[in-house]
Amino acid sequence: MKHYLIGAAIAATMTGGAFAQPTATFVNAAPAPAAIAAPVTTNAVLRVGTEVPVRLLEELTTQGKKLRVGNRFRMETSEPVMVQGVVVIPVGSPVVGEITDVRNKGMWGKSGHLGARLMYMTVNGRQIRMSGAFDDKGVAGGIGAVAVSAIVFLPAGFFMTGTSARVPVGTVVKGFVDEDVQLAIQSAAQAPMAVSAAPAATPANSTVISASTKSN
């Protein structure tokens, strides 16, 4: 399986000064200049099967009969994903999904149905394959919903229709990373140790003068 590399950088302000937090970067990316080189861990991996919750950014519905198999739609990650304490997939990373099944509502009480799958997310310009699927089904129509006393030749159920399938904006579904992704995690730079200056030694033959004098 081909391994891809992703990265995410974080900066935070700490008491007494600003120090860089651990960052995950591309292995082949040029390192940022620093006064003190921080150690880099290159054996970190974002594993296949890592859960990535995603949020729908547009409504999916069979109403209007416009939805088609193969249509793509927009989502985004709803929670950060961390590896070794470092955020490697930030909240809001774009995700693309695809419609895999469409059935519009119809006669005989048939309800609408749609199925969809996650395709990939994009992190720092790199596409990462994803897996995960979801669906929705409308409510089937009931025979007692319509009076058909004037119809002689067709059974009542012919005129019943169910409801359309609908997945609203903001719906959160589970997605999963579908490939191993190699990471290069750079540790945070350590804060310099504070060392206080030693007090100057008083010469042995010196005279200490009091801050106050007594009048004779």
Image: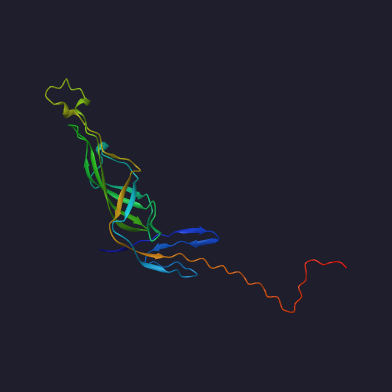
Nearer-the-camera pick, 145 or 57: 145
Q: Is residue 96 above or below residue 196?
A: above
Snapshot quadrant of residue 156 = top left
Q: Residue at x 24, y 42 (%)?
A: 114
**Considering only vertical position in the picture, is 44 above or below 144?**
below
Q: For the C terminus, which image quadrant? A: bottom right
- In this rendering, the count of numbered labels is 0
Left or right of 205 on screen, residue 28 = left
Q: Toward which corner of the image does residue 124 lie, by quadrant?
A: bottom left
Residue depicted at 37% across the width and 53% down the height: 93
Left or right of residue 37: residue 174: left
Q: Position of residue 138 (x, y in %)?
A: 25, 36
Instruction: Name the residue at the bottom extreme.
Output: 205
Residue at horizontal 42%, vertical 62%? 23
Toward the left, the furthest residue is: 153
Q: Quadrant of residue 161?
A: top left
Q: Nearer the viewer, residue 168 or 51?
A: 51
Picture colour scheme: rainbow
Q: Nearer the viewer, residue 155 or 87?
A: 87
Q: Is residue 51 above or below residue 170?
A: below
* Residue 178 rendering spot, x and y as whole percentages: 27, 57
Image check: 211 left or right of 215?
left
The one of 158 and 180 positioned closer to us in this rendering: 180
Q: Position of residue 130 (x, y in %)?
A: 29, 54
Q: In which quadrant of the rendered image does the N terminus lie?
A: bottom left
Q: Residue furthest top?
A: 150
